[in-house]
Image: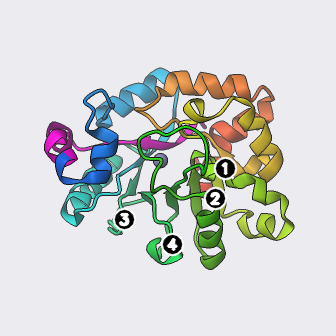
Amino acid sequence: MIVDIHTHLFPPRLIAERARLAAADEAFGEMYADPKAKMATAEDLLASMDRAGVDVSVACGFWWSDPAIAAEHAAYLVEVARDSGGRILAFVPTPIPAEGAAGIGEVRERTPEGVPVSRLPVLIHGSEETGHAYPGKTGGVTPGAFGRLIEARPEARVIAAHWGGGFPFAALMPEVRASIAGRVIFDSAASAFLYTPEVFRRVIDLVGVEGVAWGSDFPLRTQEADRAYVEAAVPDETERAAVLGGNAARFLGLSR
Ligand SMILES: [Zn+2]
């Protein structure tokens, strides 16, 4: 099973209103005010999945400041997931625990208190403490904040997006490795814009292959190109199958 654990969808109405929303919501504006920043609907994602041979995609919301917009976004994600026959899993914007949601995300809460208490997995936007600037980097969850968060919330099941901002080095500490085992998985979303392909080998060695899952960050990256990128970076067939879907399927409780 091929699973993309990190994509983004928006309802058509919010895409049509992007300029107004970008002016009203600072975080959204930072990432989507530029009309060249891609936004996608469920139809776009399903067509992409057909092209790229993806069985299941996790579709995330956005960290809106307006709860009404977040609720509208969540309702759309749940609806398209329900209509997708299991191909799309809805990760809804916090703090809406929508019926039919498979998870919560993408969030960028830096404090343990900010992360919603839920039985559902939470996808957290990691940010590096160094390196080049890009929209969405400022205000993300840095490795230190991420470490405090998972320490304070031992029950939380977490998808640490964008390689957890570089957190995996800490997994060489035995107590950290024990604390993340089975409940934290690191995704590769936007990796091609951040790191050299060696990051796949390095993180597999640091956290164990079972702790790594492919995320494309579609539509920022096409699933087709990003899947090919991962396949080139992870030549071993067993590891590749785990990263491209086996690990995500286990983490999300998927079967077929
Ligand atoms: Zn993100």
Q: Which residue, given by chain and number where applicable, does mark 4 sit on?
A: 111
Closer to the chain start, of discs 3 and 1, is 3
Q: Nearer the viewer, residue 132 or 186?
A: 132
Closer to the chain start, of discs 4 and 2, is 4
* Magenta region includes residue 6: yes
Q: Are marks 1 and 2 in contact (CB under 8 Å)?
A: yes
Residue at position x 47%, y 38% in the image: 217
* Magenta region includes residue 110: no
Question: Which residues fall within the magenta stretch?
Answer: 1-22
Q: Are marks 4 and 2 in contact (CB under 8 Å)?
A: no
- Specify the quadrant of the image occupied by residue 256: top right
Q: Which residue, given by chain and number where applicable, does mark 2 sit on?
A: 143
Picture coordinates of residue 12, whole percent (x, y): 19, 39
**Element type at mark 4:** loop
Q: Which residue, given by chain and number where applicable, does mark 3 sit on?
A: 94
Q: Are marks 4 and 1 in contact (CB under 8 Å)?
A: no
Closer to the chain start, of discs 4 and 1, is 4
Q: Is residue 169 above or below residue 14?
A: below
Closer to the chain start, of discs 1 and 2, is 2
- Asked whether the viewer can see residue 87, the reply is no
